[in-house]
Image (cartoon, coloured by chain):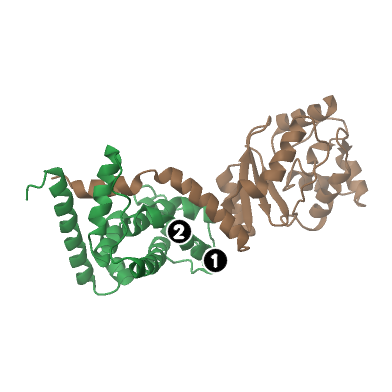
Chain colours: A brown, B green
C-alpha cells in the first residue's frame, strides 16, 4: 500500500529546498551580523597551496587553516575555545580573500586586513606578533626571532610559537627558517613553506 | 566516542549525542546544516512556500540568540519546531486579519509540475490550522505525538486525532484529483 499523499507532501515540501537553504543560510549570517551575534564567520578560498579555510571575528582574521587540517575539526575547536556562534559568511571574509588572491598573484607584499590574535597568548603571542617585522622575500632564523623578542635562549619556544601561529600567511611564520638555511617545519606542510618562500623570492 | 548506534540513529540521535557532552557546543553552522531542511519543510507545509522563508530565518535567529547558554540536554529539533510553530501562528493570525482563507499560491500557473504542487498546497490549505501543524510536525519532522501535542497544545490523543483527520482529508483531496473526482 503506497502512501501517495505522504510522498506528495514530501516531494512538494522538498522542491528547491537545497537552493533555498543556501540563500537562507547566507541571509541568516547577514542578520546575525546586523544583530552583533556573528561571533565567528568563515569562508574557504582556493589558492596555489590548496583550499584555505579563513575564520574571522568582528575584530579580524582569527584563524587560517591549510588542507592539512579538516574544516570540521578547526570549527569544532573554535566553537569550544571562542564561541559556537559560527556561520559561513563570504561577506566578512571578502577583504581577506581578496588580499590573499593579490598576494598569490604577486601583486601584494603586505597584508592590510586586521588579525585577531586571541587564540594565542603570552610568549607565543609575542613571537607571532613580531613576525610582522619580517619583510616579504626575507627570512629570519628561529634564533634571530628569539633574539628579536628579547629572549635569545628561547629558540625552541619560538619554533613551537611559529608552529601554532593561528594566522599563517597573514603573519608570515613561513619566513622563519633554520639557522643552517633549511626550511624547518610548517603548519601547512613542508612543500607549502617551500612554495611560499620561492614565490616571494621570485617576485 | 560511542561507536554503537552512531550510524543508525539519523539526525536526531546525532544531535542528542553532541548535546550529551557537557558544556560543549558544536558550531552553529552544523545545527543549521542538520536541522535547516526539516524546519524549512515544516514551515512550508504549515505556511505555504511564500511565508516559510521568514519563519525559518526568525526561528534560527532565535536559536542563535540563546545558543551559547542553552542547556546541553536540549532537543534542538523539538526546540526549533516549537519556535517555528509560534512564528507560524503569528503569521496565520496576521493573515486572517486580511483574508479569512489561508493563502494558496496563484492557481493560474500553466506548468504541469507546478499544477501538481498547487494541488498539494491547496489540499494543505484546506486543513484546519491544527491538522496542518500536526501533519507537518509528525510526518515531515518525524516528531512523536507526545512532542507534537506539547507544541500545538492539547492532549496526545487529540493530536493523534487531528493527525488522522488531516491525513484523511489530504487523501480525499489528492485522491479526488488523481482519479478524476471518483469518490
**Is A191 situated left or right of A39 in this image?**
right
Spatial CA distance of label 1 from label 2 is 16 Å
**Res. A85 in view:** no
Q: Nearer the viewer, residue B46 or B119?
A: B119
**Is B111 situated left or right of B76 in this image?**
left
A34 w.r.t. B107: above or below:
below
Name the outermost residue toward the top: A202
Q: Earlier in the sequence, mark 1 or mark 2?
A: 2
Number of numbered callouts drawn: 2
Q: Which residue is mark 1?
A: B65
Tag in front: 1 or 2: 2
Q: Chain of mark 1?
A: B
**Res. A16 in view:** yes
Percent of width and height locating residue A42: 62, 48
Helix, strand or loop at label 1? It is helix
Q: Can you tell which quarter of the image residue B155 is in?
A: bottom left
Residue at horizontal 15 percent and vertical 57 percent from the top: B168
Percent of width and height locating residue A19: 45, 43
Q: Are marks 1 and 2 in contact (CB under 8 Å)?
A: no
Helix, strand or loop at label 2? It is helix
Mark number displayed over residue A54: none
Q: Residues within 10 Å of mark 1 (few under 14, many from 20)?
A: some
Mark number displayed over residue B54: 2
**Is B97 situated left or right of A130 in this image?**
left
Q: Nearer the viewer, residue B18 or B129?
A: B129
Mark 1 and mark 2 on one chain: yes
Q: Residues within 10 Å of mark 2 (few under 14, many from 20)?
A: some
Q: Chain of mark 2?
A: B
Percent of width and height locating residue A176: 83, 38
Percent of width and height locating residue B118: 27, 48
Amino acid at each position: 500500500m503506497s502512501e501517495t499523499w505522504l510522498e506528495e507532501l514530501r516531494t512538494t515540501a522538498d522542491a528547491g529546498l537545497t537552493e533555498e537553504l543556501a540563500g537562507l543560510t547566507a541571509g541568516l549570517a547577514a542578520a546575525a551580523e546586523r544583530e552583533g551575534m556573528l561571533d565567528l564567520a568563515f569562508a574557504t578560498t582556493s589558492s596555489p597551496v590548496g583550499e584555505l579555510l579563513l575564520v574571522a571575528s568582528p575584530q579580524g582574521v582569527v584563524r587560517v587553516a591549510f588542507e592539512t587540517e579538516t574544516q570540521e575539526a578547526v570549527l569544532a575547536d573554535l566553537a569550544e575555545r571562542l564561541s559556537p556562534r559560527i556561520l559561513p559568511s563570504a561577506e566578512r571574509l571578502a577583504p581577506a580573500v581578496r588580499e590573499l588572491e593579490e598576494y598569490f598573484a604577486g601583486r601584494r607584499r603586505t597584508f592590510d586586513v586586521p588579525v585577531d590574535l586571541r587564540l594565542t597568548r603570552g610568549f607565543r603571542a609575542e613571537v607571532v606578533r613580531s613576525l610582522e617585522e619580517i619583510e616579504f622575500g626575507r627570512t629570519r632564523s628561529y634564533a634571530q626571532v628569539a633574539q628579536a623578542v628579547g629572549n635569545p635562549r628561547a629558540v625552541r619556544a619560538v619554533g613551537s610559537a611559529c608552529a601554532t601561529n593561528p594566522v599563517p600567511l597573514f603573519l608570515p611564520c613561513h619566513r622563519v627558517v633554520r639557522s643552517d638555511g633549511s626550511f624547518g617545519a610548517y603548519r601547512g606542510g613542508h612543500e607549502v613553506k617551500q612554495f611560499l618562500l620561492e614565490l616571494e623570492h621570485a617576485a | 566516542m560511542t561507536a554503537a548506534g552512531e550510524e543508525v540513529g539519523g539526525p536526531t540521535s546525532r544531535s542528542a549525542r553532541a548535546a550529551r557532552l557537557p558544556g560543549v557546543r558544536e558550531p552553529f553552522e552544523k545545527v543549521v546544516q542538520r536541522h535547516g531542511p526539516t524546519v524549512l519543510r515544516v514551515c512550508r507545509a504549515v505556511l505555504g512556500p511564500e511565508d516559510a522563508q521568514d519563519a525559518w530565518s526568525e526561528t534560527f535567529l532565535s536559536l542563535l540568540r540563546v545558543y551559547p547558554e542553552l542547556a546541553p540536554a536540549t532537543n534542538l529539533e523539538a526546540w526549533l519546531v516549537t519556535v517555528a510553530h509560534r512564528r507560524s501562528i503569528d503569521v496565520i493570525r496576521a493573515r486572517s486579519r486580511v483574508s479569512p482563507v489561508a493563502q494558496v499560491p496563484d492557481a493560474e500557473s500553466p506548468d504541469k509540475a507546478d499544477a501538481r504542487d498547487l494541488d498539494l498546497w491547496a489540499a494543505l490549505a484546506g486543513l484546519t490550522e491544527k491538522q496542518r501543524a500536526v501533519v507537518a510536525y509528525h510526518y515531515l519532522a518525524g516528531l512523536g505525538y507526545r512532542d507534537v501535542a506539547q507544541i500545538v497544545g492539547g492532549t496526545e490523543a487529540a493530536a493523534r486525532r487531528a493527525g488522522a483527520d488531516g491525513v484523511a482529508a489530504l487523501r480525499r483531496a489528492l485522491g479526488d484529483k488523481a482519479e478524476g473526482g471518483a469518490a
